[in-house]
Image (cartoon, rainbow, N blue to C red):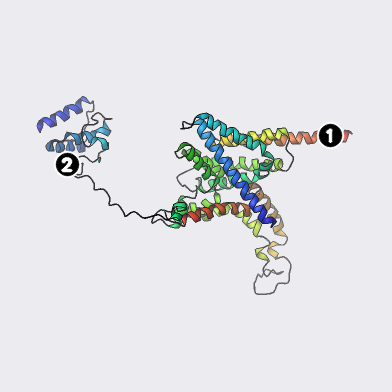
Amino acid sequence: MAEARNGLYIAGALILFAGWLCLSVAGAAIAFSKTDYPPFVGWVALAVAGALALVTMDKWVKALPAILGLSILNALLAVWRGYIGADTSRHFPRGRAALILITLVVSSFLANTVASRKLNPVDRVALFAFLVSQGWAIAGWPSLAGFICMPCCLLIAWGHERVQRSRRCGNTRVE
Amino acid sequence: MKENQKKIKRKLRSSGCPHISPHISLGLEAAAQSGNLGGIAGILTPGFGGLFGGGGAGSPGGGVYGGGSWGEDSMIYSVQPAAPPAKAPAKRKSFVSTLLGIRQHGQSFKGCMAQHADQYSLGGFASGAYYLALKQPPPTWLDAGLQFTYGNAINTLLFGSFGSAAATGVGEAPTLVGESMGTVTTFGRRTSDLMSLNLAGKGGLPQALSQASQGAKSVLGTLSTALGGGLKFTQQLTLGLGFAAGEALNCSVEQ
């Protein structure tokens, strides 16, 4: 029973995440392209998506390693096959794919450390910057800049936590 | 007729193009003989940037095979425009096929699964959202970025490219091996190298997995956790198979 509930919870979370992703992509498309809709509609959609991400950060940060896992698997396939997805005409250099894979694996390690603790304000800012970087990585495809920024954001959160922890330990010793 | 020929040559000279290919000159002569200047305009339109645009039946086609009306001696054009293909009798769609069917008429199930493999993923959904917002498919780079980040690896692994399916399995080998250790090989486990399913085991770990493999197992476990991004292989498989099941449901019904 607990497993079924857990499965339903994961499925529900996945549907919500898919909805959020669609809202973000559609919002960005409307905001930055010439469409039938006025650009402010896209900006509103992006603002809503951003607000949702901020409000639900404590929840989705737990699933962040899993979401990155999808990307890692795709990156592995791209490194191995030399193209993306099912379309063999979508060639992608293996070296570049390997670099992206490294950034994703590093992000995954760092995301695990962030997911396992209570978030502080620096973590929240870093995680939001991580989301923006991911959007940049997709929108700026095939530029590596966004992908490199992703682990950097998490690295800031991880480094801040390490500094805080060492300070706490130092204070304890003094007392 | 000769006047026509002269007219054409004069126009060509005035257009600033001194070279006339033999095919075109042959065509010119043939057309001039049949007295059809419009067809010549149809030939020349693509080459001369619409210099003779609108000059006859051939020009709207904009190409050498653009369907002009030519004389019988023409060496470039066919004389008669192609007959329109016979329409197949309209097939009435059932409610189920309207709702679910994505497989085209005559298409195999595997072909349908391969064709739509990218669409049944988080990235595919996002591409769909882009299409709904802009009423046009997403640009190739955006589609590639979305597929790279949120594509369904399992689906593309199973149906995307059959040639590479076995090869890509190697990438998932650490997880598969890590998960299979200690489960599959417990059948008939014995304290010798002999593995048999029909002999009663005496207990104890098989020698192949006893001491030496522990280190390897922990390395593989760490590696698969790292590369799996904290998502167990079975969870990734479930997620991918969920999308694949949805696609299979739609591909099972013909349009």
Q: Chain of mark 2?
A: B
- At 25% from the left and 40% from the top, the residue drawn is B66
Residue A45, position as x, y percentages in the image: 56, 34
Q: Is residue A152 left or right of residue A39?
A: right
Q: Is residue B40 left or right of residue B175?
A: left
- At 45% from the left and 45% from the top, the residue drawn is A89
Q: Quadrant of residue B198?
A: bottom right
- Farthest residue in the bottom direction? B199
Residue A151, position as x, y percentages in the image: 64, 37
Up/down of A4 relative to B204, above or below: above
Residue B135, position as x, y percentages in the image: 45, 38
Q: Amino acid at mark 2?
A: Ser
Q: Do the residues bearing badges 2 and 1 touch, measured as CB atoms within 8 Å?
A: no
Q: Amino acid at mark 1?
A: Gly
- Please tell me the numbered disc located at residue A170: 1
Q: Chain of mark 1?
A: A
Up/down of B178 relative to B17, above or below: below
- Farthest residue in the right direction? A175
Circle 2: is it few (<14), some (14-19), or many (20+) Cα within 10 Å?
Answer: some
- At 55% from the left and 31% from the top, the residue drawn is A43
Residue B127, position as x, y percentages in the image: 50, 42
- Please tell me the numbered disc located at residue B63: none
Q: Quadrant of residue A47?
A: top right
Residue A174 visible in image: yes
B219 or A55, which lies in front?
A: A55
**Residue placed under numbered mark 2 in the picture:** B74
- Farthest residue in the left direction? B2
Residue B163 visible in image: no
